[in-house]
Amino acid sequence: MRAAGILLAYLLGVLLAAALVAPGVYFVAQWAAGEAAFLKGLAAQPFHRYLNRCLLVLAVGGLWPLARGLGFGGWRSLGLAWPAGSQRRLGWGLVVGFGSLLAAAGTMNLAGVRTFNFNLPPGTVLTLVVNATLSGIVVAVVEELFFRGLIFNALRRAWSLLTALAVSSLFYAGVHFLARVQHTGPVEWSSGLALLPAMLGGLAAPENLVALVSLTLGGAVLALAYHRTGTLWFSIGLHAGWIFWLKVFKTVTLPGPTPGGEFWGTDKLVDGWLTALVMTVLLAGVARWPLAGQTPGVTHERPPGPGT
């Protein structure tokens, strides 16, 4: 329970600290815009964006203290060892991640729910690909370190594998449904605290149920892949491939002639039972891999799973 207590304290601490710090950052930006004209665009941003950015910065900034508090001594203990076969794992993760959601997108295209847009200008395609690739790399590394390297790793030390998988995956999915609320009226020192209940309300929104299931299954795939391989590299590649498609899907496809529905989802791609089915298939596949080692960094010479 010590690990669970530290993780809960970290989460609550980040939420409260961001809510208290965000108004100050907002006020400083307003003052700075009066001193330097080039900062006026920054000052014009709505308050909820300051709160979101403060949440992100504080969450990332607290990763290393959190790791130390949970007893992890270095990058290797968090799953970033580089034994033989790591490059292959990373590559296969990218292939499976990209290919699995490409299969979902292709199925939607064949069903007429979404159609691929082949009329995009080359400049738009290049910008989209570059931005989606960079986003995939950054998000995959940060989230895998946090959700799998830290949270799942800490929980599986204290609890059974199944419990650690379930709790860490639900937490991973739930964080993605903190509502993106907007602040109205003048900003005060209590404005951040006033927005927190509305942000947490996104967790209970009925329209998020299917996406919550899909992301929970996806989190379980990523965690189990880490457990089976002993390092985070396959999970990082898999996650990056998914992020790429989630970033480009809305732009590279258009609504098709066939009405969508709960099974197909929307242009978000992750909010349909089709994606949940894809995640279920991946989870069943990863569950069949041989176990490389019980602790990060203990691996076989050949990576288990794809390519072995």
Image (cartoon, rainbow, N blue to C red):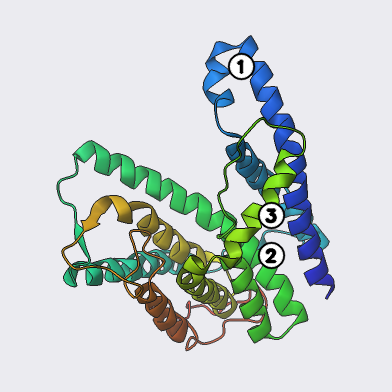
Give the quadrant of residue 158.
bottom right
> As displayed, is residue 130 above or below residue 202?
above
Which is nearer the N-term, disc 1 or disc 3?
Answer: 1
Q: Which residue lies furthest to the front in this view?
A: 185
Task: Give the labeled residue for mark 3.
Answer: 197
Give the quadrant of residue 244.
bottom left
> As displayed, is residue 26 above or below residue 295?
above
Give the number of the mark in front: 1 or 3: 3
Q: Give, as a three-letter code, the residue at label 3.
A: Pro
The residue shown at (76%, 39%) is: 190
| Secondary structure of residue under mark 2 | helix
Res. 81 in view? no
Residue 150 is tagged as 2
Residue 148 percent location from the top left of the image? 62, 67
Determine the CA span between mark 1 and mark 3: 30 Å
Q: Give, as a three-letter code, the residue at label 1.
A: Ala
Nearer to us in this view, 37 or 240? 37
* The C terminus: image quadrant: bottom left
| Secondary structure of residue under mark 3 | helix
* The N terminus: image quadrant: bottom right
